[in-house]
Amino acid sequence: MALAQYKYMDIIHRCFRCGYCKFPQDWADVDNCPAYARHRLESYSNGGRLWLIRAWVTGEIQWSPHLADIVYSCVACKNCEEKCPLSFSDEIINMVVAARNEMVELGLLPPPVKDYLKNVQLHGNPYGLGAKKRGDWAGDLSVEPYADQEYCYFTGSEGAYDTRAQQAARSVAQVLQSAGVSFGVLGNEETDDGNEVDLMGEDGLFELLAEKNIATFKRRGVKKIITLSPHSFNVIKNKYPQQGADVEVYHYTQILADLIGQGRLRAPRLDGACITFHDPCFLGRWNNEYKAPRKVLKAVAGARIAEMQRSGKSALCCGGGAGNYYTDLLGASPDSPARIRVRQARETGADILAVACPNCLTMLEDAVKVEGLESEMAVRDISELFALSAQ
Amino acid sequence: MDSVYRALADIVGEDYVSEQTEELFTYSKDLGTSEPRWPEYVAAPKTADEVSRIVEMANEQKLAVVPLGGGMSLAGLALALRGGITLDLKRMDQILELNEQGRYMVVEAGVSHGKVTSYLHKNAPHLMHSEPGAPPAATIGGNLAIHGQGDLAHPYGFNSDMINGLEVVLPTGEICRMGSCALGNQWYTLRPLPDLSLFMGWSGCTGIITKVSLRLFPCKKIQEQDVFVVENENLVPEILFKLTHVGMAEDLVVVSQEIPPPFNRLHYILINLAGDSREELEFKRQLIFDQNLAKYIQEGTGGIGAAGQDIERPVVSKTSDWRKGGGFEYVGAIVPVGFYPEGFRLGVEISARHEIPYTVLGRVVGCGHSMMFSWTYAFNRADNDTVSHARQALHETDERVLEMGGTLWKPAVFGQKLVMDRMDANTREMMKKVKTLLDPNGIMNPGNWEVA
Ligand SMILES: Cc1cc2nc3c(=O)[nH]c(=O)nc-3n(C[C@H](O)[C@H](O)[C@H](O)COP(=O)(O)OP(=O)(O)OC[C@H]3O[C@@H](n4cnc5c(N)ncnc54)[C@H](O)[C@@H]3O)c2cc1C
Ligand code: SF4
Ligand code: SF4
């Protein structure tokens, strides 16, 4: 049966399936689409996925759990949009998300996606943990509730609930405190930012989440936001304004870069360390911010920065976008993007793999363990390097 | 779960085999106008040994095996015309050796042209290979299997003339090497052993190429594209004769296309030059323009369209989006250079009849010995009428090319039949013997080059 309402019917057939979208900028290999890197069958490449979606929409093939897995295996990393030379390229991820909209509408989701959305719906976070515990990450840090400080610090669900990401959430707070930045937090009043919910195609839930957060911003008089997660940064910056938000939003690395410029932040000393940086897609390809995290890292005294061969616009995504850090549709293989990525990081000789995203942090740290690289390379959020000297 | 699936999973691993509708659907189509043809299994092997075990198993089961590289041929050559197993070879993508002094590299056949370019750029910037104008996902093996040609075609000929050795899995599963590598582990020459090149140009019907020793050529520091424009198509062959006499260009391509309108009916002769210094380039330009092409400028029949432009490589064909429709297919023909004017007029005429903006292109192969001439027909994938128009235009072109004495390059099955019908009977008989000898069970990409 053909789907009546698929939004991109007028362009989805325009994918030639030429495969430019699999490459990094320098053509080094066909594996820069994380879903394709993991599976290496054309069905999982961007062109394959678009052709499959079209076939489902026109009724040429029927929905199946496997089709749903393929559609949800795209992590929305935007590598394809960066590389596709054709004029519709800006719409590639929208075309995938629109197919997910239909799957949500029809209740045809892969089970982990269903769990994710259900948890967010019921608890305001994908982990299914109590909404009341959202503010617990701060522990005994004396973080103030947001009142009329300059910034509101928005941790997002991973920072609030994931034990490893909580450490990053705390170190950002510590660094901001050490530099004398005026900020407060929303505590239990924050709810999931909705970036992944939106990309998973659950429009209605996304709108609810955005409305809830925006109402809180308005009620509490929030004007400027610092986010821990590039995912929160992305959605607040690019999607919330359409829902009526009127806030300035910064990723914490942008604030840190500024503080360094102003001489307000004490940089750590890491003599002899070699650091490589993994660009998060939602800071890099989604928001064109490649400089701020590098500026922050360059301030680390005594350390050498080694760029991975694929960095900036060519960075391979850790495989955690669009909720995949939770649904894990690209896991369980040496070809999982996170495992490929830590091998790429290790090739630089780095002993610290620096990240600026709580999803990347958990994805890549797990991958380092599975790859048996723990004794050679540590995964650290940039804020954690700075929190060392803040203490 | 059936036994073939089980056997494939044992060989390549569960992750890299499928018999599910989604994969079969994906591999049932390529980029061109061919009707979908569904394989029964898809597998992505990693090594020649895995390929060999699959082929042995397929022989026992009398199952078709269809090799697939980048799938860029457009002509449906890697579609499973008789079902069976589609082997996606892109996991065989290792660069095994670079011998700078001997100017060759040894690669697995599923490696993409893009990866080879990038590797050389980083590791041996003074060397290059002849990259086709295809999207960079095209593979080395697939391109040889269709006698491709690339951006060094003028000095060095077809890409299949540019190899120093091959490893092939025969249709019966043996892994076999050709060239000096057959004697040991050195991959420096294909000659002077008895000629066994039965694998290139066969579209995978005689075996699966698994490793290639690829010849590399000097990559000069500065590369540029100059463009000479003429209005009269009849002038193109003599200009190309002059240019090939000078012998300075790396690539000589003539393009004429309806879109964008200022290009319509003009002939753009693209001249790729390279030099290690500005003086070297200047010298080449002088020879070309001042001594050989000045006559046309003075007469007012030709002019310099551009000079010193960057060479965009690889060049995507945006033609696929001309009708906002995601597709085109072209007839490529190998013809004498003197064919250009007639080929151009043929393209304009057939395209107009099928309401397709015309695009023709000719690339000199060798020192003017031949030319790859293509007629490209864009279509809208969502509009069946335009697809069948394009298909019809392709068929008409195939027929006309042969009538005019041309030879079809990488023809689809329709064109292959036309070629075999016209072929010298003894040659066709020999083709048949070779095919039967190598592939007694007829499992290799059956439906293509069926000589019977
Ligand atoms: C926009 C565009 C521009 C192009 N420009 C050029 C150009 O300038 N020059 C040029 O030569 N071509 C050109 N082509 C055609 C295309 O480049 C070639 O078809 C391509 O290089 C073939 O490589 P592939 O890996 O895509 O082969 P595929 O299409 O995957 O396969 C081609 C044939 O070879 C067989 N095959 C594949 N791999 C192997 C193997 N390892 N061993 C044995 N058989 C195998 C397949 O079964 C099939 O029959 C162009 C195509 C496009 C879309
Ligand atoms: S998305 Fe763009 S680059 Fe990728 S296959 Fe389609 S047309 Fe080619
Ligand atoms: S967004 Fe990333 S994962 Fe999704 S198709 Fe594009 S490159 Fe692949």
Image (cartoon, helix red, strand yellow):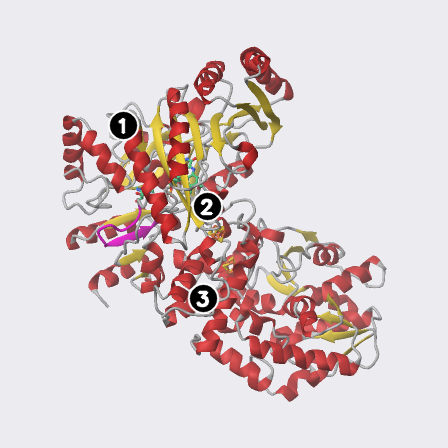
Report if the beta carbon of the residue with label 3 is closer than 8 angstroms to ligand 3.
no
Circle 3 residue: A71
The answer to whether marks 1 and 3 sit on the same chain is no
At mark 1, the secondary structure is helix
Compared to residue A304, the image places residue A212 above or below, namely below
The stretch in magenta equals B78-89
Circle 1 residue: B403
Q: Which amino acid lies under the numbered mark 1 shown in the image of this protein? A: Glu
The answer to whether marks 2 and 1 sit on the same chain is yes
Instruction: Tell which tag, 3 or 2, sits nearer the viewer.
Output: 2
Residue B6 seen in render: yes
Q: On the picture, is B311 further left or further right than A219?
A: left
The image's mark for residue B320 is: 2
Q: Residue at x 61, y 52 (%)?
A: A313
Q: Which amino acid lies under the numbered mark 2 shown in the image of this protein? A: Ser
Q: Residue at x 39, y 44 (%)?
A: B72
User: Relative to the observer, which residue lies in front, A81 or B114?
Assistant: A81
Q: Which amino acid lies under the numbered mark 3 shown in the image of this protein? A: Val
Query: Dot 2 falls on which chain?
Result: B
